[in-house]
Structures are given as C-alpha cells and as structure tokens.
Amino acid sequence: MAHVQCAKIICGSKFKVYDYLTSPANLAEQLAGHIDVKWQNPGVELAPESEFLFLMTRFGIEQPIRFVVDRMVHGNSLTYRQVSGVYARFVHTMKFEEHGQNETLVTDFLEYEIPFGLIGRLADDFFIRSDLIKLLEARLEVARLKFDKENLTSTTGAAKNNGSAAV
C-alpha cells in the first residue's frame, strides 16, 4: 500500500475551511481543470456512514466512484474511503488544526493501492503517485485562493465602511 501526504496553511477559521473542503457539493470546484466531477446523489448529509456517488471524468474516461464516510469530528477531521471506483484501496483523511490567528493548517493523508499487480505498482512509481500529490495540492490551493479572496473582500468592505462612517 502506498501513501501521500501534503499540507497547506489556509487563511480562514478552522470550521469554515473544514466545511468548504469536506462538502461534496464543492468537490467539482476544488478539482476543476483536473477532473470533471458530477455529484450523483446531492442532498446526502455529511455524516459517518454516509455514502456519496460521483461521476468523474478524466482524460475522456468517465468512471462512477462511490465514497463512504468512515470517521468525522466536525471541524477537526474527516476520513472517507472509496467503496467502488478506480483504486483497489483508497482512504483519504483530512485534518484541520488552528494555526495562528484565523489560520488553519490542513493536512491531507491518502492511503491507496493500485490494481493490476506489478504493472499497477510500476504505473504508481512512474506517474500515479506524483499525479495524486498534484491533485491534492491543487485542491488545497483552490481553497487557499478562495479564502484569500474572501478575506480581501471582507477587509476591503470593512475599510470602506470604516472610512464612510468617519465622514
């Protein structure tokens, strides 16, 4: 079994960052430009044992993927696993920790196993592992940019309100 890990500090409260990164409704936005994601069973509440079905398309190949939430502590961590899809095994854990004032350290830890025996392991060594790291990092970067933009907008709005109140 292989694993990858990446982390990023995001300027936002732990609970807001958690809610954004763990919401199935946001996955298409987070993976845009890399994987086309269509949520097939919208409205399912995020909770332990919840099952989510997505239709994911990459390189022109469409694949139904089912995930089940194994563990979650709201605002702190979420672990889900693939129950059907591309990988022989796929378990993704996200951890959220306060890091300074209004900052959150997000750590993604992914354990996975590629099917197809030796050929799968060779593919993993040559490109799958690096591709998974790129996808996880890109997802966290989308979140960072979103929260940076929100913080800039709220700061600019507060500055305008403070300026006009003083007049």
Image (cartoon, rainbow, N blue to C red):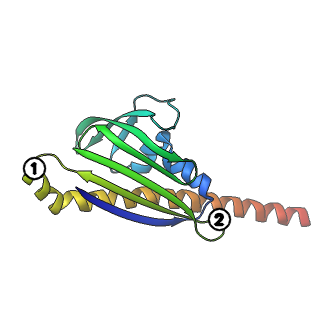
Contact? badges 2 and 1 (CB < 8 Å) = no
Name the side, left or right, on which 13 lies relative to 125: right
Name the side, left or right, on which 98 lies relative to 160: left
The residue depicted at 64 percent of the width and 61 percent of the height is: 151
Name the side, left or right, on which 89 lies relative to 24: left
Q: Is residue 149 above or below residue 48?
A: below
- How busy is the neighbourhood of tag 1: few (under 14 within 10 Å), some, or many (20 plus)? few
**Cα–Cα span, label 2 and label 1:** 45 Å
User: Which quarter of the figure has residue 70?
Assistant: top left
Disc 2, SS: loop
The residue depicted at 19 percent of the width and 60 percent of the height is: 127
The residue depicted at 37 percent of the width and 51 percent of the height is: 92
Q: Mark 2 or mark 1, which has the lower sequence index?
A: 2
Mark whose residue sits in front, 2 or 1: 1
- How busy is the neighbourhood of tag 2: few (under 14 within 10 Å), some, or many (20 plus)? few
Q: Nearer the viewer, residue 35 or 43?
A: 43
Give the labeled residue for mark 2: 102
Residue 117 - label: 1
The residue depicted at 48 percent of the width and 44 percent of the height is: 26
In this view, which residue lies farthest toward the right?
A: 167
